[in-house]
Image: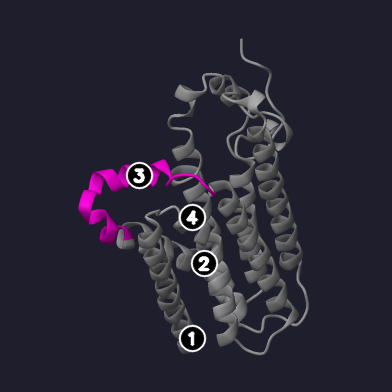
Amino acid sequence: MTALFASLFTGLATILVAVTLVWLLSLVKRDVSIVDIFWGLGFVTLAWFYRTLGPEVTARHWVLLVLVTLWGARLALYLLWRNWGHDEDPRYQTMRAYRGDTFWWMSLFTIFFLQGVLIWLIAMPLLIVQHSAGPPLWTWTDALGLLFWSIGFFFETVGDWQLARFKADPANRGRVMNTGLWAYTRHPNYFGDAMVWWGYFLLALAVPGSLWTIMSPVLMTVLLLKVSGVALLEQTITERRPDYRDYVTRTNAFIPWLPRKRSS
């Protein structure tokens, strides 16, 4: 237990150092949006760091490292491509205008350290798996975890790809994306992200005494639904795209399901 706590707090120190370096880069670029690109890479960083502190590597360790690296790298590359050549995210522009001359140093605490702590908290299943040798054989929770991760990665990757193609067509300017996976959930990428983290939790569940790490997927799901995901995105979208109201009446916000009949 002492070794676990040592790994836990050295992990916190590691991620805070990492986000501080990203913060310094944001000062040079004058663009806080790069913190979003680092989000997925932060989990990759912690997963590999925890591996260096863990016991002899096993198949379960390697499987989790591959899954986290694939997920984090894809997300980072997608956000880098999507944001390339664009101005700072409007959310951060608003914060910059509100804080004025103090924003440059306050952003370290209110944005970068905050995201670093969230990464650290959500990454608990990654710590548990890498810290323990785990059962020698694969369990049914491992199989379920791989299934959840695969479904989540599919929804997140395909959803992002479909939306990017939709936005690339000038004929779709001002229109609502409601085809492909977006016909079954208004946010397939957020649903996929949540499923990925429930998958990591299920992979960690094979380790005795790891049930408490359920806080990780619960926290991620709450963030995606109520804080930085669905709730934030849909605050003003109906003002910009009136057709979105009809889309809301026909399509689930999060969990995929068959679209309902068009409202009259």
Q: Position of residue 200 (x, y in %)?
A: 63, 64
Give the class, few, some or many, for how many residues have Cα within 10 Å of label 1's Cα (few <14, many ≥20).
few
Give the class, few, some or many, for how many residues have Cα within 10 Å of label 2's Cα (few <14, many ≥20).
many
The label on residue 36 is 4
Earlier in the chain: of badge 1 and badge 4, it is 1
* 1 vs 79: above or below: below
Question: Marks 2 and 1, how far apart in space?
Answer: 24 Å
Q: Amino acid at mark 2?
A: Gly
* 9 vs 162: above or below: below
Q: Is residue 31 magenta?
A: no
* Front disc: 3 or 4: 3
Q: Amino acid at mark 1?
A: Met
* 80 vs 163: above or below: below
* Front disc: 2 or 1: 2
The segment highlighted magenta reads 84-107
Q: Position of residue 261 (x, y in %)?
A: 68, 18
- Tell me if label 2 and label 3 are in contact, CB under 8 Å: no
Q: Is residue 91 magenta?
A: yes
Colouring mode (rainbow / by chain / secondary structure / one colour): one colour
Mark 1 lies on residue: 1
Provide the major secondary structure of the magenta segment. Answer: helix
For the point 26% across and 54% down, the residue is 103
Q: Quadrant of residue 137?
A: bottom right
